[in-house]
Image (cartoon, coloured by chain):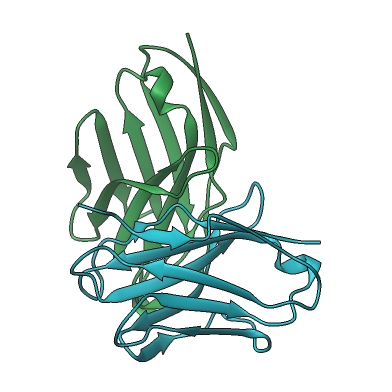
Amino acid sequence: GESVGLHLPTLSVQEGDNSIINCAYSNSASDYFIWYKQESGKGPQFIIDIRSNMDKRQGQRVTVLLNKTVKHLSLQIAATQPGDSAVYFCAESGGAAGNKLTFGGGTRVLVKP
Amino acid sequence: NAGVMQNPRHLVRRRGQEARLRCSPMKGHSHVYWYRQLPEEGLKFMVYLQKENIIDESGMPKERFSAEFPKEGPSILRIQQVVRGDSAAYFCASSALRGDTQYFGPGTRLTVL
C-alpha cells in the first residue's frame, strides 16, 4: 500500500556537523517528494522538494537525494544549527494518490550545542 | 505577503458540539487541502478542494465531517457532534496550481472535553 516511512525516529547532532535524515517510500508511482520541517506548536514549513525526473537538488544548506531504484529519499543539512532542531517529515504525492500528500511519521532532530 | 491563515488557533469543544475551522489560503492560491495530525504522528490527508468544488475527499470520515470552499471567503472544515477522538491538530495547506508545492498554515488545535 501507499506509505512513507522513516528509518530513524530521533537524530542527535552536534552543532556544526552535517545531518542526514532518511525516508523510504513504497508507492513507485509517486513523482513528487517534499521535505517539511515542523517546530513545536507550528505548521509544517516547506524546506525543499524534488520531482522524480531528478536525483539531486540543492538549496541553502540543504540537499535532497532521490533514489528511485530503492525508493529512498534523504535530506542532508549542512553545518547543523540550533535552529534546525525540529521534527522533519518527508511527503510524497503523485500516481493514483493524485495531489494529496502522504506523510511519513517524522524524525526528530536534536542539535546539541 | 501573508501566508496561509487559520483560525481559531485553539478550539475547545464539549462532546456533541460542533467545531468550525477556517482557512484562508495564500494570496493567489485557489487549491486548499486539509490534514489532521495526532500527537507525535505525521499528517493525514483529509480533503482537497478548489473554489466551490470538492476534488478529493478520500481521507474524510464518512460521518460528521464536511468541508467547503465557497466562491467568497475562507475554506471551512466542519465537525458535527464532536467526540474525544476528534482531538487533534488540523492543518490547512494551499497551492497555486494543482500539483504545486503545498504551503501550510499554523493549524487549529482542537480539544474535545
The vertical placement of B49 against B89, above or below, is below
* Left or right side of A4 for A56: left
Chain A, hue in figure = green
User: Residue drawn at (34%, 91%), measured in percent from left and top?
Assistant: B52
x and y percent of residue A97 in the render? 41, 77
Q: Going 42% across and 57% down the picture, which residue do you hit? A: A91
The x, y position of residue A22, in whole percent, is 45, 40
Determine if residue A112 is in view. yes
Vertical relation: A3 (above or below) A47: below
Q: Is residue A97 left or right of residue B78?
A: left
Q: How many marks?
A: 0
The foreground one among B28 and B97 is: B28
Answer yes or no: is residue A1 visible: no
Q: Nearer the viewer, residue B63 or A33?
A: B63
**Image quadrant occupied by the C terminus of chain B:** bottom right
Q: Would residue A24 be found to the left or right of residue A79 on screen?
A: right
Relative to B71, say whether A87 is above or below: above
Q: Colour of chain B?
A: cyan
Compare residues A23 and B88 and report the one nearer the observer: B88
**Residue A84 position in % (x across, y down):** 40, 27
